Image: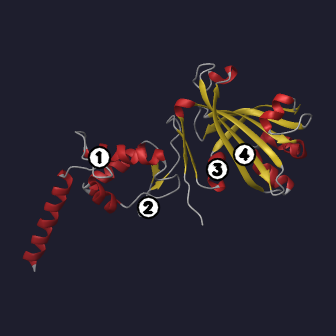
């Protein structure tokens, strides 16, 4: 029995050594480049995370499955996962699955992964809103066109920067327009760092049931370019979100500007019958 145990241990050691020396493969069977095995695993998984193959909040395959996929040892997979944790792309703890998370503060990457309205709410809630100004405005023709509103309507305008948690560098500059029927949220904004639509739901008993999101390029506003580490007028990504309640009425419109170089958008679409 002792001989069989020793033989099994030697075989396992041999297999581990062989696995550690085996050439890593990309998805689809592409052979590895001449870089460390863990580096190739990091490159592939990082690319897949950023492209939305593994959306934020989902779990990566187990170490055993990853080792089998890349034809490497579990030690190599652990080193690759450690690097991804250092990059702030995943989180894990002993005995629990590895989960994809938002990029770490200061990483310079902002990932929008949208599969449902709850995903959108989670992303917005993760950024703190530092308010610079609050005022009531009357929609002229230009503003009405931006908001999809009528000329002459009153809106509460709030602007400022949004920051990832524990990061001194802003992710974007944002204007938020709240319909006058819900302008009472203004008195709560001094103590609120989260999304304004949550205040509308809490204070007025309404429920946001639909969010229309539009992405387009536009010139970076001169007054905020320096804070966003961009040049005035350079290309920015403008994200416009229209928040509607059950009746179809627009309660809020937010318009955010992100530096184009640090913006990634991912959308997961599923077929329904």
Q: CA distance from mark 3 to mark 4?
A: 11 Å
Can you tell which mark lies on residue 195?
A: 4
Q: Identify the residue position indicated by label 1 in the image.
A: 38
- Quarter of the image for residue 241 reads top right
- Percent from the top left, x then y, of residue 36? 25, 42
Q: Identify the residue position indicated by label 2 in the image.
A: 97
Residue reaching furthest to the right: 152
Residue reaching furthest to the front: 273
Q: CA distance from mark 1 to mark 4?
A: 39 Å
Label 1 crowd bin: few (<14), some (14–19), many (20+), radius 10 Å: many
Question: Helix, strand, or loop for circle 2?
Answer: loop
Label 4 crowd bin: few (<14), some (14–19), many (20+), radius 10 Å: some
Question: Helix, strand, or loop for circle 1?
Answer: helix
- Percent from the top left, x then y, of residue 62? 37, 61
- Quarter of the image for residue 176 reads top right
Disc on the earlier residue, 3 or 4: 3
Can you tell which mark lies on residue 120?
A: 3
Q: Residue at x 84, y 50 (%)?
A: 249
Front: mark 3 or 4: 3
Disc on the earlier residue, 1 or 3: 1
Front: mark 1 or 3: 3
Instruction: Indicate the quadrant containing the N terminus: top left, top right, bottom left or bottom right.
Output: bottom left
Between 173 and 263, the residue placed more toward the observer is 263
Tell me: residue 172, above or below residue 89. Answer: above
| Residue 89 in view here | no
Query: Viewed as shown, does residue 174 lie left or right of 33?
Result: right
| Residue 221 in view here | yes
Question: Helix, strand, or loop for circle 4?
Answer: loop
Q: Residue at x 82, y 31 (%)?
A: 143
């Amino acid at each position: 029995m002792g001989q069989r145990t020793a033989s099994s241990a030697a075989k396992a050691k041999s297999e581990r050594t062989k696995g550690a020396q085996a050439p890593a493969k990309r998805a689809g069977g592409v052979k590895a480049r001449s870089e460390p095995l863990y580096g190739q695993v990091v490159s592939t998984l990082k690319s897949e995370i950023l492209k939305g193959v593994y959306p934020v909040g989902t779990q990566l395959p187990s170490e055993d499955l990853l080792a089998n996929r890349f034809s490497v040892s579990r030690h190599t997979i652990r080193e690759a996962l450690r690097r991804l944790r250092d990059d702030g792309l995943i989180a894990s703890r002993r005995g629990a699955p590895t989960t994809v998370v938002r990029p770490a503060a200061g990483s310079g990457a902002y990932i929008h992964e949208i599969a449902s309205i709850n995903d959108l709410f989670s992303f917005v809630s993760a950024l703190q809103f530092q308010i610079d100004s609050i005022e009531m405005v009357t929609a002229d023709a230009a503003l009405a066109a931006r908001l999809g509103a009528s000329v002459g309507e009153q809106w509460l305008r709030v602007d400022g920067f949004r920051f990832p948690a524990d990061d001194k560098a802003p992710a974007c500059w944002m204007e938020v327009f709240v319909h006058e029927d819900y302008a009472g949220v203004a008195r709560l904004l001094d103590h609120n760092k989260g999304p304004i639509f949550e205040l509308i739901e809490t204070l007025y008993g309404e429920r946001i049931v639909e969010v229309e999101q539009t992405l387009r390029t536009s010139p970076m506003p001169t007054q905020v370019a320096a804070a966003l580490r961009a040049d005035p007028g350079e290309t920015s990504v403008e994200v416009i979100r229209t928040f509607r309640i059950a009746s179809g009425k627009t309660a809020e419109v937010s318009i955010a500007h992100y530096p184009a170089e640090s913006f990634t958008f991912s959308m997961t679409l599923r077929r329904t019958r």
